[in-house]
Amino acid sequence: MSEEPLPPPDEELPVPPQEPEPPQEPEPPKEPEAPAEPEPPQEPGPPSDAPRGPDQYSGLKLRKSGPLATLSRAITIFQKDLGTMAKHGLISSVITAIFLGIVFSAASYSMSIALTIDFGEGDGDGGGEGGEGEGIDLPGATEGVPPVADAGADRTVEAGTLVTLDGSGSTDNAEIIYYSWYFEENFVDVDLYGEVASHRFMAAGEYDITLMVVDSSWNMDEDSFMLRVERSGTDTVSPMADAGYDLDVMAGTTVVLDGSNSTDDTGTVNWTWSFYDVVPRVLYGETVSYTFLNANNWEGYWGTLVVRDASGNTAMDDFNVRVNPTARTTTSPPPTSTPTPSS
């Protein structure tokens, strides 16, 4: 028998095919495990620089209990608080003391000034002949003799005349430093100042004119005279004044005062309206307007209209304006109408 030749050593022997493994049966599903309970958070430990507890100190002394110990601690705390208040309250105390000193000084000075005022009737003592005015001793006064006021003699002029008021006849043992003239014209107060003053009197009538004088020591005296103003020309008929109807308005309303219904036989030349609203108010003209801002619905604002003609004849009429306080107004809806059926 002949032998088969061996394969060369570099060639690999063929591997016989392997049989496939049989499929494995699937494993049954596992039951889910119960979640583990979370561990409670641990409290953080004290920091490294934290003060040591009392058990780490040797020879620690505990507070004593009892009434005497409590009283002792209260006294100690009070002493510390008192020292703190004394330290911080020093500036406030100084400021308060300065303020009270200023107030007391001002009050003392005011009282001393008030006690030096002595009102009394001038009796002429002091080196001169005084008038019948009041002698007043005020700070800075050097004498108590009042001056003698001289307003001049009674006079009669015609309407429209410019009248000169002359108080140069007044005398004093020292010096008169103040002259004041006052009177009423057409229900309006008139004030004039100076040793000599002037005023044109247009309305016929009688005027009581008063002069008051004051000297350098605050002594004063008064004197008055009667001025009669007669009608000019031949017209002796007075006009008829008509201020219109009384009014009832709300606060803030601008009111028109109408005197155009006033009449005169020769014609009216002047209309003077006067009333009081906080201060005296005077308006001029046949028709004027004024805004009433202050409510006065109890008695209203009473006023007077004085009319004058060219001859100086005058007439007067009163008026009233009742001013009600403003209130929040509400607008009601318009009424609804029922439609009428057409025939």
Image: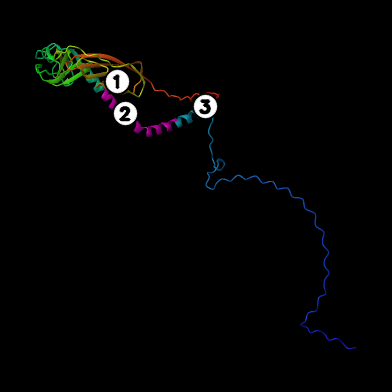
**SS category of the residue bearing label 3:** helix
> What is the count of numbered marks?
3
Q: Determine whether label 3 and label 2 are within 8 Å by CB.
A: no
Label 1 neighbourhood size at 10 Å, few (<14), some (14-19), many (20+)? many
The x, y position of residue 252, in whole percent, is: 35, 24
Residue visible at 52% across and 27% down in the picture: 67
**SS category of the residue bearing label 2:** helix
Q: Determine whether label 1 and label 2 are within 8 Å by CB.
A: no
> Where does label 2 land, which residue?
97
Going from the N terminus, do you reach mark 1 or mark 2 first? 2
Cα–Cα gap, marks 3 and 1: 88 Å
> Where does label 1 land, which residue?
257
Q: Nearer the viewer, mark 3 or mark 2?
A: 2
The amino acid sitting under disc 1 is Leu
Residue 309: name its quadrant: top left
- The answer to whether one can see residue 216 in this image is no
- The answer to whether one can see residue 92 in this image is yes
In front: 29, or 332? 332
**SS category of the residue bearing label 1:** strand
Residue 113: name its quadrant: top left
Give the residues drawn in magenta, as a range: 78-107
> Where does label 3 land, which residue?
67
Left-right relation of 98 to 203? right
The x, y position of residue 327, in whole percent, is: 41, 23
Residue visible at 41% across and 31% down in the picture: 82
